Amino acid sequence: MGNVTFTNQSGTTFTFAQGEVNVVRGQVGGDVEQNPLPGSGPIAAFLFDFNGPVKIITINGQLFETAASRTDAGSVTTILEQKQWLEQNINGLQGATAFSSTYEGQTFDGSSYQSTTVAVGEVSFDEESGNPEELKFIMRFLVGT
């Protein structure tokens, strides 16, 4: 897998180390609401309200300590520093930020492919007993165009 990077709103890029990201999953689905047509009887006829496509990128893996900083500004090397840096990007005021991986670096905006911009939807960490050398994580990004 190529480099997986996340650039926050301040322009600081976090690069996951080789071997940290196990899976990058892109999922595209339609945002469709199905409503029964009033008065259509026991076998209802339905109206469909199509709001457009929704794309979600999910990455999962494990953070581990490295000698080199994960960011291009400051020093983020320990597992705790990485966790705190990733968590601080969910602040309720975030704008569009950049995400890049081998196959998710560009997203179709309806007419052409553009650099993938995302908002962090959620991030979770799993601290496992007996394994202090890594911290498993899952991050979900909501793709914007």
Image (cartoon, grey):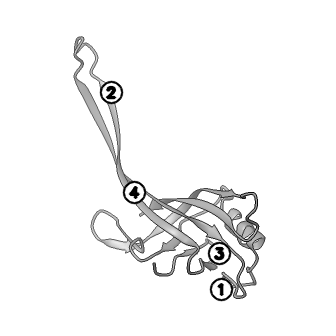
Closer to the chain start, of discs 3 and 4, is: 3
Q: Amino acid at mark 2?
A: Asn
Closer to the chain start, of discs 4 and 1, is: 4
Question: What is the C-alpha distance between the residues marked 3 and 2?
Answer: 42 Å
Q: Is residue 33 left or right of residue 79?
A: left
Residue lying furthest bottom in this view?
A: 68
Q: Is residue 72 left or right of residue 23?
A: right
Closer to the chain start, of discs 3 and 2, is: 3
Residue bearing mark 1: 72
Query: Mark 1: which secondary structure?
Result: loop
Does the residue at mark 3 contact the one at mark 4 (Cβ under 8 Å)? Answer: no
Along the line of sight, the residue nearer the viewer: 61 or 35:
61
Question: What is the C-alpha distance between the residues marked 1 and 3?
Answer: 12 Å
Q: Which mark is residue 10?
A: 3
Query: Mark 4: which secondary structure?
Result: strand
Residue bearing mark 4: 27
Q: Mark 1 or 3, which is nearer the eye?
A: 1
Q: Amino acid at mark 1?
A: Asp
Closer to the chain start, of discs 1 and 2, is: 2
Q: Mark 1 or 2, which is nearer the eye?
A: 1
Residue lying furthest front in this view?
A: 130
Graded by Cα atoms within 10 Å as few (under 14), some (14 to 19) or many (20 or more), the crowding at tag 1 reads few
Does the residue at mark 4 contact the one at mark 2 (Cβ under 8 Å)? Answer: no
Q: Residue at x 59, y 77 (%)?
A: 16
Query: Mark 3: which secondary structure?
Result: loop
Q: How many marks?
A: 4
Residue bearing mark 2: 35
The answer to whether 113 is drawn above or below residue 35 in the figure is below
